[in-house]
Image (cartoon, rainbow, N blue to C red):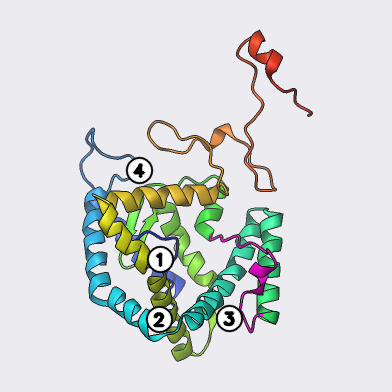
Amino acid sequence: MMENYRFHAPFKSPAAIASVALAALLTGCAAAPQPQEAVNPRDPWEGYNREMTKFNDAVDKAVLKPVATAYTKAVPSPVRTGVSNFFGNIGDTWSFVNNLLEADVQGALYSFWRVAVNTTFGLGGILDPATQMRLDRHRKDFGLTLGRWGMPPGPYLVLPILGPSTLRDTLALPVDVWGNLANHIQNVPARNSLFVLSVINTRAQLLGATNLLDQAALDPYSFTRDAWLQKRRNDVYDGNPPPEDDDGSQNAARYDRPSGGDITPPITAPASPASSASAPQSSL
């Protein structure tokens, strides 16, 4: 599935999640294809990933998609919007923490005020007055924070049920699970009910996208992989990523990343006297 959501299991501890992720990783390594010229450097475990995608698609067609479709038909749109707002408000709290870790002051302030306004005036997050106040959402998770710190994404990796990921995002998953406030609810039935509702709500939001993907893409796996990797890369650099090398790896060393979150190319020497005459002078 092509999306930027994580399904966090509240009934599992971070240690358990880490064990599942490690098992998936080891399985992927065991099933990795032998090196050859046609291997995509971003997807060296394509054989395993395609098989796991088939498994996830089977589970989705048998369980998740039918339930999400029934949920969409049975629950009025305003109620579904309120559910999405509620979980979005919970996500903003973790985004606030990760924006702070990235030293993104503006993103942290936006996330803080979104939570404050929506929790206070939005009935605990069911309504979203913060958006009406033009407080844009700066969605972040720990995988993006690691990328902002300079950690490369590593190989593409499809996780059981959870779907598209990378090695970096898989390693960050236990921290993201811990950072989800819903997972700290002491009442187990309430916590598990919220988890199930979040999964159904997330899948319902993706019904249109998956239908379009099945109709438009000749190879849905490759399309999903490339779109996922590109979006995660854009998110790391707040929509302004540096150029990629020929092998598809990001060349972040060429760029500085100031604390304000903007990506600006360094000042380089002009190639010729003619070009220097027309180039703007630095004010530094």
The residue wearing badge 1 is 18
Quarter of the picture holding the N terminus: bottom left
Res 94 quadrant in image: bottom right
- Circle 2 SS class: helix
- For the residue marked with disc 4, what is the amino acid? Arg
Q: Would you name the residue on which mark 4 appears?
A: 42
Q: Is residue 61 visible?
A: yes
**Mark 4 / mark 3, whichever is N-terminal:** 4
- Residue marked by disc 2: 196
- Residue 47 shows which numbered tag? none
In the image, residue 137 lies in the stretch drawn in magenta: yes
Along the viewing direction, whichever of 165 and 212 lies nearer the viewer: 212
* Total marks in image: 4
The residue indicated by pointer 3 is: 126
Q: Report x, y in % for residue 128.
A: 62, 74
Three-letter amino acid code of the residue under disc 1: Ala
Q: Is mark 1 on a helix, strand or loop?
A: helix
Question: Rounded to the nearest whole Å, what is the CA distance between mark 2 and mark 1?
Answer: 21 Å
What residue is drawn where x is 48% and y is 89%?
A: 190
Residue name at image x 44 percent, y 75 percent: 13
